[in-house]
Image (tube, rainbow, N blue to C red):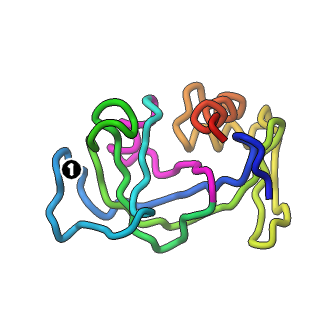
Amino acid sequence: MMTKGWECEYQIVRWRPVSVVFTKKPPKELKLKGNASSIPMSYPPKLDAVFSWRCRQTIRKGRKHEVGQVRWIFEWSGRPYRSPWGRRMLVEIVAVDDCLVMEAVIQIVDGLGRIIRGCYWHDRRADQLAAADHIDPPTGIALRDVLKGLNKGG
């Protein structure tokens, strides 16, 4: 297991919307339990694409998402982790790829940590992953830099 700063285990998480987009607190019957019931979004170029359902993918540090789980996706109304939620919607996770992210490459791995496929950040496949994740500009190098910036704390 890798744990050196931003270079570590991630998941590519894909979802389908299961609710409308709420701009205020949703009905109580839609309340989910547990700490892992939400996925915050804070990358500005991606927010409108997520809430218009054009972007249905995110890359998350760690290994806590599974196919079939229902999660809230939300944006912060102000400063991340210090302000209330803004727009939010319920999604069902439909696909999860575990991956290892390193300075030079991203590698998709199986449940035993064996490499299934991978590519260098400057490769066309990394550019396609960046485009699906609505990274601006849609390049593998920019995706790597965004992951570094969002996860610099380790």
Q: Amino acid at mark 1?
A: Phe
Q: What range is drawn magenta here? A: 45-62
Left or right for 68, reference 104: left
| Residue 86 to residue 45: above or below | below
- Residue 135 at x, y percent in the picture: 56, 33
Tell which of 28 and 68 is nearer to you.
Answer: 28
Tell which of 135 and 11 is nearer to you.
Answer: 11
For image coordinates 82% across by 62% down, the residue present is 116
Does residue 57 belong to the magenta stretch? yes
Left or right for 104, reference 98: right
For image coordinates 45% across by 29% down, the residue present is 45
- Residue 92 at x, y percent in the picture: 41, 66
For image coordinates 16% across by 47% down, the residue present is 24
Residue 101 visible to the viewer = no
- Residue 121 at x, y percent in the picture: 77, 36
Left or right for 64, reference 7: left
Query: In the picture, residue 117 is in which quadrant?
Result: bottom right
| Residue 3 to residue 94: above or below | above
Query: In the picture, residue 66 is in which quadrant?
Result: bottom right
Tell which of 144 and 20 is nearer to you.
Answer: 144
Residue 77 visible to the viewer = yes
For image coordinates 46% across by 51% down, the residue present is 56
- Residue 90 at x, y percent in the picture: 32, 60
Check the image and name the residue furthest to the top. Answer: 137
Does residue 122 belong to the magenta stretch? no
Query: In the picture, residue 32 is in which quadrant?
Result: bottom left
Residue, disc 1: 22
Image quarter (top left, top right, bottom left or bottom right) of the N terminus? bottom right
Image quarter (top left, top right, bottom left or bottom right) of the C terminus? top right
